[in-house]
Each structure stands twice: as C-alpha cells, then as structure tokens.
Image: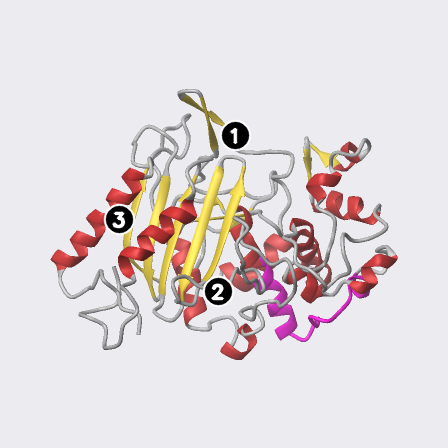
Amino acid sequence: MWLIVCASSSIAEDRKCGEEVRELVQAAGLGAADTPGVAVAVLNNGQIRFQCAYGLRDFRTRHKIDVQTNFRLASVTKQFTAMAIMLLAHDGKLRYEDRLTDIFPEFPAYGRAITIRHLLNHTSGLMDYEDLMSSADSHVFFSRGQIQDAGVMALLKQQKRTMFSPGSRWAYSNSGYVLLGLIVEKVAGSAYPEFLRERIFAPLGMTNTVAYVRGRNEVRNRAFGHSREGQGWNETDQSPTSATLGDGGVYSSIEDLAKWDRALNQQRLLSQGEMQAALTPVQVEGVQEPDGSPAAYGFGWFLNGYHGQPRMWHYGESIGFRTTIERFPAVKLTVVVLENRSDPDPARLALRIADLCLSAHQPGPARGGNVC
C-alpha cells in the first residue's frame, strides 16, 4: 500500500505540509507577488486539502491570482474533449471504430483508414496543422490572425496521406483533437463550447469553466499569459494557434478542477466500465513522454505510472501558459499546477509536491490519514 506522508491526523501536520509545498513553490521561482504567477492545489477525492496562489492575473488591473482564477489549460483540454466523445458513445450516437469519413463524407480518401479511436489515442498519423500553417496559402484559413477549427479541417483536406499508417504508430496530434471537437459538433448538433457546458461543466457545477471563443463568450476572472523578456514580462496571451478548441481551448481554475477531479473519482459522468477505454494505454510503437522516455496514452490522458503508483496526467503548453494535472487514483490524490507564464515546468513542481504526499512503497495501513 502506498502511504501518504503528509497525514491529516493533526492541524500541525497539515500546517507543516503546507509550509513544505510553499517552499517548493518559492524554490521554483513562482512566489513573487508582482509577476505573473501560479495557482496550486492538492486534492483528496476532489476536495481541496491545500491551495496556494501567487502573482498577478495581468499587469493592467494588477488583480491577484486566487483559486477562482481561470487559466488557459492548453492541452489539459484534451481530457474534456475525450469525455465529450465518450458521452456521445454512451448516448449511442457514435462508436470508437467509426471512420473519419463516416462522420465527414467529404474528407479525403485517406480518412477512411482513421477511426475515432485513432484520434483519441494519437495514432491517426494526421499531419500537424501547425506545420501545415507555414504553407504559402494557409493565411486564407485565418480569422483575425488566428486559425480556427474550420481552418484546420481545410488544411487537412488539402493533404493526400497521413504520416504513417493509422494505428501503426503513436505521435502526439493536436490535429486529431481539433477534429474530435468538430466531431462533437457534427454528431451532437451543437457547438463544442455549448456541449461541454451542458453535458460536463454545468452538471458538475464548474460554473466558471469555458471553452473560449473570442466574441462569443467570456472568461471570468481571467488570467492572461506572459513571457519573460530580459528582466521584465510581456503579455503573450494569444498566438496564431490559440483559437482552436478541441486541442486546447478550455479555461478553468483550481476550484473548478477540484469538481472535475471529484466527478472522475465518483463516476459522475460515466460508469467505471465506460471509463476503462480512456484508461487503457494504446499498444503501438513510438509512445513517449514529452521528454522522450517511454509512456502510455489512453483517451486524453497519459497513463505511465510514477514510482510504481498508477497515474493519470497531462500537461499543457501555450504561449504564456503552462499547466499540469497529476492524478494518483489509487490513493485519490491529485496535484494541479496552473501558471500564466512561460516558465518554469509545472509538471516538475507537481511531482515534487506529490513526493511530499506519497511515501515509499511498504506494507501496512496508512498512518493517520491520506491527504496533505
């Protein structure tokens, strides 16, 4: 049994654990009050057991980051896109083995070999739309300087083939998750942001979480992204790829992500059996973590373990934002780190915090409690 070192058996122990987490945040260079910053949460079964926030949401208002501050999640969005697809499968409106051309008959012939399952677990072989944006005529698919989902679809329709035979290899694909967002819209008959709101966010009480579309909705308590330049900071909140949805368009806070975590633990949206598909790692060549080490991927989650502990996790990187969620479902421990700045690495910080909470693997009952 894995033990939790930061036990909840006394207020003193909780305070000591909190002090250690704060020291890690400070050591990571994230503790300043007058720079872009960070929100951190340690969750047990969806309940916030420790939280801290440092820094500014933006330099114009100088509002402070807090637990309700909404950060662009970037690729942490993919777990919500995957859940949307799984809910449609639950409804009987699609199957994981449906072909891309079943959903979009006008898609080029190479889409006949691509299934929804391939899109979910990054084995489709689709060209990366960010690479395709460098083509001479790609600007025609931009709106106000950004590519949107329809533009990604148009670029992919110009292609004649995939990078490899679908299902034969693994390669992380933002293109695939943009298409999954479009599949949600086509099959559900409602816009992607509305489907997420109606089927995921509203039922779970995630009232401030939104798939952001400029001019159509707003992000409350919004953090703006920043990048360091010399000794100062520039607001770098949007790039040409910041308007796509299914691969990275959701904004959320540690308060709302605690509700998401609780729902996953309690199977609020799907049964344990229905969730199994998301938690089954794909078995193909080329599956790697971002650092190149061997990894496993399901539907919207990396699934490689950590020190022998089962783990579901994902990272997000976008201009001015870096995020991570690290879930250890066997002990119902989750660490969330959200930054509105381009450095440092939130996953490294999250795992150091997890190390405070997870003891060495040894037999015997948990000591005193099971949360930081």
Q: Label 3 crowding class (10 Å Cα cut-off): few <14, some 14-19, many 20+?
A: many
**Residue carrying label 3:** 21
From the top left corner, tell me how far across and down residue 239 is, in percent: 60, 33
Quarter placement of the C terminus: bottom left
Q: Separation of disc 3 and disc 2 at Cα?
A: 32 Å
From the top left corner, tell me how far across and down residue 327 is, in percent: 41, 61
Check whether the beta carbons of the residues at disc 1 and disc 3 lie within 8 A of each other: no
**Residue carrying label 1:** 236
Left/right placement of residue 165 relative to residue 293 reads right
**Residue carrying label 2:** 203
Principal SS element in the magenta part? Answer: helix
From the top left corner, tell me how far across and down residue 196 is, in percent: 57, 58
Task: Please tell me whether residue 41 belongs to the stretch shown in magenta.
Answer: no
Quick check: 299 above or below 157?
below
Q: Which residue is drawn at 40% across and 35% down?
A: 57
Element marked by disc 1: loop
Marks 1 and 3: which is nearer the front? 3
Q: Which amino acid does label 1 sit on?
A: Thr
Q: Residue at x 70, y 65 (%)?
A: 116
Relative depth, front residue between 330 and 284: 284
Task: Please tell me whether residue 101 belongs to the stretch shown in magenta.
Answer: yes
From the top left corner, tell me how far across and down residue 232 is, in percent: 41, 21
Range shown magenta: 81-103
Relative depth, front residue between 317 and 143: 317
- Name which quarter of the figure residue 28 lies in: top left
